[in-house]
Amino acid sequence: MRALPKPSKTTTAGGPGKRSARQGGALTPYLFIAPALVVYAAFMLYPLARSVHLSLFDWDGLTLATFVGFGNYTDIFADARLRAAFGHSLSFIFFYAVLPTAIGLVLAAVLTRAKVHGLPLFRTLVFLPQVIAMVVVSVAWKQIYAPDGGLNTALRAIGLDVLTRPWLGDYAFSLPAVGLIGTWVSTGLVTVLLLAGMSKIPTEQFEAARLDGAGAVREFFSIIVPAVRAEVTVALTLTIVASLKTFDLIYMTTAGGPGSSTTVPSYEVYRRAFETGQVGSAAAIGVTLTALIFVITLGVNRISERAA
């Protein structure tokens, strides 16, 4: 009687063949993301790592560098100008993120509940600052804030001459003046995001709330705000990042002045790297700013997750 052939090792359940197939399948997702990861590493991770490396040296961009360790980072806390720059950047969070989000919530709620005609046109107009180059926005607002610009002209026309001033040249008002430009730019983006979120709220919820005697304010806090929590998180993340890394607005309007009353970390990176020859210090400022942005945005998203 002929003996039956022995089963092959590669076909045995749980054998090397099965394990190889499983390992190949596990690697498949990574092969799909590999091209994007290579591009990301080449244009994001490598420059960041190079910046961290440069931040450990005292270098003017031309001569030999001198290793100083964390000396450039300690200078950030010791230099009053740099401390002020980071303080200004944090204050811009109010103008770029908090204020536009508050305005956008109220504006989007009113537009959604009031059934305004021509809503698509309004969305286009309110979003327009986002599609205009920041250089153009800066030049336009610089003209408005000029001593003989539109704002002072309007104040004189209504008899408020005492309030006129060179807004971008005043130590007390230059920072809020620049910040309000950021508010004007960010409000449209936030409003459009929140309008999209509010459009998904079922009308039955509002009808039920009205039957229970809820007014507009109660509807706003009990229905609208919880429903657009995800959109608020996205809006805050985008606007906070924009506020902390703003450069072109400062460069075109005040160049950090008067004095250093409107300077921000991004502008200090440019000034030190290309004007004063402190490349190592500029790299340290950039790395610190990147870490600050990461921590703040991570905190915003964690708070949103816990509140959900």
Image (cartoon, rainbow, N blue to C red):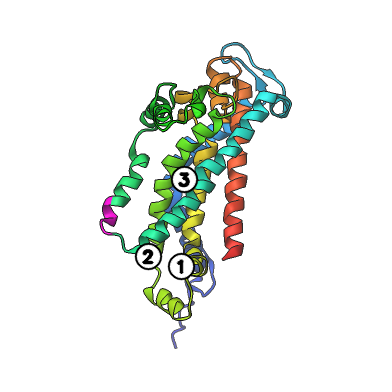
Alpha-carbon distance for marks 1 and 3? 48 Å
10 Å crowding of disc 1: few (<14), some (14-19), many (20+)? some
Q: Is residue 118 magenta?
A: yes
Sequence-first tag of 2 and 3: 3
- Left/right of residue 150 with respect to residue 232 in the rendered view: left
Q: Position of residue 73 (x, y in %)?
A: 69, 29
The residue lying furthest to the bottom in this view is 1
Q: Nearer the viewer, residue 258 or 10?
A: 258
* 130 to 81, vertically: above or below: below
* Residue that label 3 marks: 37
Alpha-carbon distance for marks 2 and 3? 44 Å
Q: Position of residue 152 (x, y in %)?
A: 43, 27
Q: Which mark is residue 178?
A: none
Q: Which mark is residue 216?
A: 1
Front label number (1 vs 2): 1
Secondary structure predominantly adopted by residues drawn in magenta? helix
Which stretch is magenta?
117-121
Instruction: Name the amino acid type tagged 1.
Output: Ala
* 28 to 276, vertically: above or below: below
Rendered image quadrant of residue 256: top right
In the rendered structure, are the residues bearing label 2 and label 3 in contact, judged by CB atoms less than 8 Å apart? no
Q: Position of residue 284 (x, y in %)?
A: 63, 28
Alpha-carbon distance for marks 1 and 2? 9 Å
* 100 to 58, vertically: above or below: below
In the rendered structure, are the residues bearing label 1 and label 2 in contact, judged by CB atoms less than 8 Å apart? yes
Rendered image quadrant of residue 69: top right
Instruction: Name the amino acid type tagged 3.
Output: Leu
Instruction: Name the amino acid type tagged 2.
Output: Arg
Q: Position of residue 16 (x, y in %)?
A: 53, 66
Front label number (1 vs 3): 1
Sequence-first tag of 1 and 2: 2
* Residue that label 2 marks: 113
